[in-house]
Amino acid sequence: MKLGEKIRYLREVEGALRGFDRAMTQQEVVRAIKKDLRKPLSQSYLSQIESGARPHLTNTSRMLLAKFFKVHPGYLVDDPEGYATELISDFGAVEDKLDFWLVDGAERFRNDPDLRESLLTLAKHPDSRRCLRLLELILENPGLADRLFEVLTPKPKETP
């Protein structure tokens, strides 16, 4: 994963953690860094990092962003060619990877609000793996998904 993708992902996660139900904007990140850490960072610099126009962070910026997003500074670099996180076998890491995948999917489907919200809700659940397993079981039972959708979907209010 490229550095810019990591920053976009971290903005998505930080937005969810702060209850925004969306990614923090670059400007919101800059303001929060100034407020929380009392250090300046420009929105244009952050934009250049995310777009790939500036492929590397200064050490000062790396440490500032790592502290703000609460990640190890070593995370804030491009992953080496051929790097694969799939080799991790620890169950907790697998759950984190699944949640990352769901948040990434939500970002990719940001123009479909229903799908985006569904993926984010699933990612926020403490056992998203079990939720996906439940979905599989529902889909294996003919007609159950349609019936549940019918029962659980709020009905629009009728106008008099």
Image (cartoon, grey):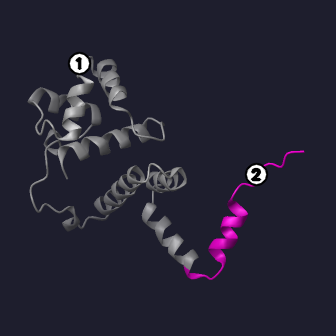
> What residue does disc 1 label?
40
In the rendered image, residue 48, in percent from the top left (x then y), is placed at 20, 33
| Chain part drawn in magenta | 140-160
Residue 26 highlighted magenta (yes or no): no
In the rendered image, residue 47, in percent from the top left (x then y), is placed at 24, 33
Which quadrant: the C terminus? Answer: top right
In terms of secondary structure, where does tag 2 sit?
loop
Describe residue 7's horizontal placement relative to residue 61 as left or right. Answer: right
Outermost residue on the right side: it is 160
- Sequence-wise, the earlier of marks 2 and 1 is 1
Any mark on residue 156, and which? 2
Most foreground residue, 85 or 104? 104
In terms of secondary structure, where does tag 1 sit?
loop
Query: Which residue is drawn at the image coordinates 39% and 49% (left, top)?
Result: 107
Residue 81: quarter of image: bottom left
Q: Amino acid at mark 1?
A: Pro
Describe residue 32's horizontal placement relative to residue 18 as left or right. Answer: left
In the rendered image, residue 30, in percent from the top left (x then y), is placed at 30, 25
